[in-house]
Image (spheres, grey):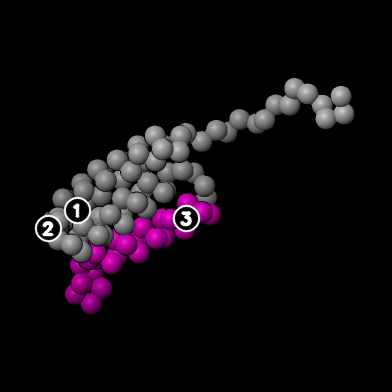
Amino acid sequence: MIGGIVLWNTWWAWIIFGLVLGMLEMLLPAYVFIGFAVGAILTGLGLWVGVFGGSLAWTLVTFAVVSGLAVVALRLTWGAPTRRAKIWTTDIND
């Protein structure tokens, strides 16, 4: 609580949290933080519009569900990251 403002029910705090998670994804590319960033931003927008809100429990459940759907959608769209090294079978000098 900052000056009497409850942050978990404040829309701009969720959007800032989403932007911080987006920056964290750029620094540590794990392909996980981006889903949580999308979830936090959509949770903030939902609180701003007034689609949902209320208790801390429902806000966190909403964040978890939206983040999970965002992770699944991003995996289906971009695919899973490949961590394998490229194996060259031909030589450029051949």
Circle 1: residue type:
Thr
Most extreme residue toward the top is 89
Residue range in magenta is: 1-27
Instruction: Give above or below for 42 relative to 89.
Output: below
- The residue lying at 31 percent from left, 57 percent from top is 41
**Position of residue 94 measured from the top left corner of the image (x, y, whole percent):** 86, 24
Apparent side of residue 90 relative to residue 59 in the rendered image (left or right): right
Indicate the amino acid at tag 3: Leu
**At 41% across and 38% down in the image, what residue appears?**
77
Above or below: residue 65 compared with residue 79: below
- Marks 2,1: beta carbons within 8 A: yes
Q: Which residue is mark 2?
A: 54
User: Residue 65 vs residue 79: left or right?
Assistant: left
| Residue denoted by label 3 | 24
Q: Residue at x 52, y 47 (%)?
A: 29
Name the image quarter holding residue 18.
Answer: bottom left
Q: Which residue is mark 1?
A: 59
Q: Is residue 91 magenta?
A: no
**Residue 82 vertical position relative to residue 36 in the rendered view, above or below:** above
Q: Secondary structure at mark 3?
A: helix
Residue contact at pointers 2 and 3, CB within 8 angstroms:
no
Mark 1 crowdedness (10 Å alpha carbons): few <14, some 14-19, many ≥20: some
Quadrant of res 52: bottom left
Residue at the location (47% across, 58% down)? 23
Question: Please, what secondary structure does the residue beneath circle 2 have?
Answer: loop
In reply to whether residue 20 is colored magenta, the answer given is: yes
Q: What amino acid is found at the position of numbered circle 2 in the picture? A: Gly
Q: CA distance from mark 3 to mark 1?
A: 22 Å
